[in-house]
Image: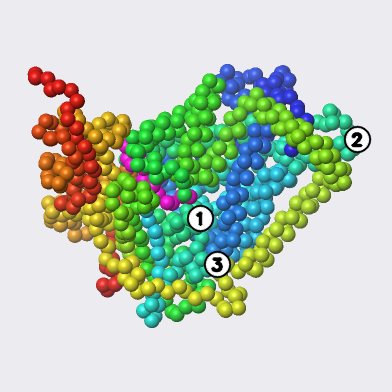
Amino acid sequence: MKRWMINAGICGYLAALAFGFLCVACQTRFFWPPVYFLTFDMYGGWSGYDCKMQVIGEGQSGRFYVLSPGPWGEFKPYSSALSRQCYDQMFEYGNFLMRPALAHTEHEPILRVFVVEQEYPKKFNLSDAQYEAYYLKPKPQRIYSHTRMVMSPDGGILTQSPTWLRYQDNLSVNDNPRLLADATRNRPFVWSAQQTPGPGGYAGPAYVPAAFLPRLGSPVTE
Amino acid sequence: MSAIDLAPLQTAPEILAPAAAGETENHGSAFARSIRDFFHGAELPYRLALTRIFLTFTILFPMAYRWYYSREIFSTDGSGISLWSIYGFPCPWLEPNGTVVVAIHSIVILALVTSCLGWCTRSSLILATSGYTYLTMLDILSSLNKSSAIASHLLFFLCFTPCGAVWSVDSWLARRRLLRKGIPPKLVPAPSLSPLWARRLMQLLLATVYLSAGITKLPLRGYFSGEHLQTWMLSTIHTPNLLGSYVAMHPSFVVVCAYVTALWEVLFIFLVWKPAMRRVILGLGFLFHAMTCLTLGLFVFPMICVSAYPLFATDSEIEWLRRSTRNGWNWLGARFGAGVRGLAASVGKAVPSIEPAWSRGAFVAALLSTGVGGVALEYKLDRYGIHRPDGPYKLQELDLEKVSALLAPTGRIANEDKVLNFDIGSIFVGGCLFDRRTTFYQGETLRAQCGLIPPHENMWIQCNLHDSQNRVVDTNGLFLSCDMLRALFYYNIGDCVAPGDYSLVLKIAGDEIMRRPITILPRATACLAN
């Protein structure tokens, strides 16, 4: 009996491993927690940009406050350069990240929360000496900011835009006047579905063109 | 521990042979028999003990580091983001508050320590496995990752093995108990045998991890051309590393590494079982993980994977390790004299014999006191500053100047940021320039390569030759579609280009991006007519 139980366990585990491997090989995604433990698709995407994330709140007085990290200090899980919120690769968990600061600090009423994505080329991570030796000029201090979401203090999304990479990719596609004219002329009045291209994009399988996502205006210009 | 005498290792067939005789073991086809022997042999659990020690020691570092932040990253008092909630399976009852999380976290740390030492090993491993997996699932941002998933699998299988029967406090206590009862050392029974299936499944897990990682990379755009590894090496997302930024600027070396890595990952599952190839494959594995540490800044992931490597050790290697341990102990004894041994013996005599029930009781007491003590200490440390004399913290205000920079309209990427590298040479390896040169002779072909960072639009990119007074001598340009990652320019340096100092200037939309100085020398060989 015990031998049969062990055999069943072995077969079940091997079947689960095979299932996970097939998911990886066929680039199929199942959004179910146990599948995370069976699919080993490490380093399945890349980007030439490093990112940081800022979660800031706008108070009733018009002042802005840092909501993540909280005033008690940062938690840097891996890198000495990046706080925990910077590991939110799609900048979508601002509603969780702002929670402790709003719950455990004294503050004026917060009206809106902005999730801001900041991106810069990874080549800027080279040391100044290395950068100057290779590029033969001083390293510029340039960082691209992009408002990813505006939320209410209770976590509801008021408006959102695609990630900065998706937005820039969309801009580069829209640079083609013929394509833009064609798309404008033939755009359906009612979308029947959102089409997503297959995997293989530089940003990994979650690649979706920004054209299909709503774009928000800058809060400063609102 | 070293108090265990060497018992001759028995291989699985040797152990099984007497038991199998006359039983049903020899029934079935040769294939079925080989499968049965593969999973249902038995062995002394030295390999499992090594994995237990290395794995729990490795996991202890990230878990201990996170303890102070436990309330903030795992609990509903903080910003814990659980795996099930992001997949659309909200289970609020599974998400604990800060106090419960701190208690669980404290107990998990103790369980990892006792698992490493081998005290109440099975209970420790069960607690460590369940607690560690649960906690990592509560924080998908900074605790759950594929290395923690692999560690959870390995810990889970260790729970089913008698890996605490050797090199553990449990085995030391058991042996000491028997010696105290007057049993001669030679009559102390050998450690219990471990079934093979758990080790086999852990081996297959590691092999599947490598195979999946290799298969993931095969269709990935930019992997075999080097951009994938280059950009990861330049990233700051992991811990700082020694070599990443240097290696990343040598794309041809990166391309060679990419091919070797993918080949090794895919072949691991097929070759690691072959005696002739086992050491080569495992050696490459050590090298691979060392390089991920040195170039990508990975520490925990390599250590978790390498902690499973003892599972592939042969009997002779384990025998060698045991003898080395024994010899090392003897050398220490000889080096530091009889005093150390006498001290150890007197301490051993002074401590009373510990019965298993006492040991278990002490373990439970330690767990309870650690849980309660952890909660009390965390309350005292007061991460959120709620109990400060000044009252809770105030939110940090941002300058309006900084705010307007953050919330400004999204700008376009500067042309300069679309270029990663620009190199000049003459030899290609794996599609990348291998030799970087600044001196060329008339009659040679110069090759200039420019690496691009996506996203970029369809572009017209120029690579012009300027003389020492910055006058344009020659122009060259090409179209690049938005999916291209590399531009390549060829120059045949003819006799019309006089010897001297020049520069190759890379331009996008009229903006000068980079400039590479070169020197052109007179033709080294005579020009042949037809």
Q: In x, y percent, where is residue B517?
A: 23, 42
The reply to whether callout 1 and callout 2 are in contact (CB within 8 Å) is no
On screen, residue B345 versus residue B484, left or right, reads right
Query: Mark 1 belongs to which amino acid?
Result: Pro
Q: Is residue B377 above or below residue B132?
A: below
Q: Secondary structure at mark 1?
A: loop
Residue located 73% across and 46% down the image: B120
Residue hosting label 1: A77
Q: Quadrant of residue B279?
A: top right
Q: Nearer the viewer, mark 1 or mark 2?
A: 1
On screen, residue B203 versus residue B418, left or right, reads right
Badge 1 and badge 3 both on one subunit? no
Q: Quadrant of the C terminus of chain B?
A: top left
- In front here: B309 or B237? B237
Q: Quadrant of the N terminus of chain B?
A: top right
Q: Which residues are magenta?
A: B222-239
Q: Secondary structure at mark 3?
A: loop
Residue hosting label 2: B182
Query: Mark 3 belongs to which amino acid?
Result: Asp
Residue hosting label 3: B77
Residue located 62% across and 41% down the image: B54
Q: Dot 3: within a 10 Å radius of its alpha carbon, few (fewer than 14), some, or many (20 or more) residues?
A: many
- In front here: B57 or B526? B526
The reply to whether callout 3 and callout 2 are in contact (CB within 8 Å) is no
Which chain is mark 3 on?
B
Marks 3 and 2, the one that precedes in the sequence:
3
- In front here: A61 or B502? B502
On screen, residue B131 versus residue B448, left or right, reads right
Q: Is residue A162 above or below residue B153?
A: below
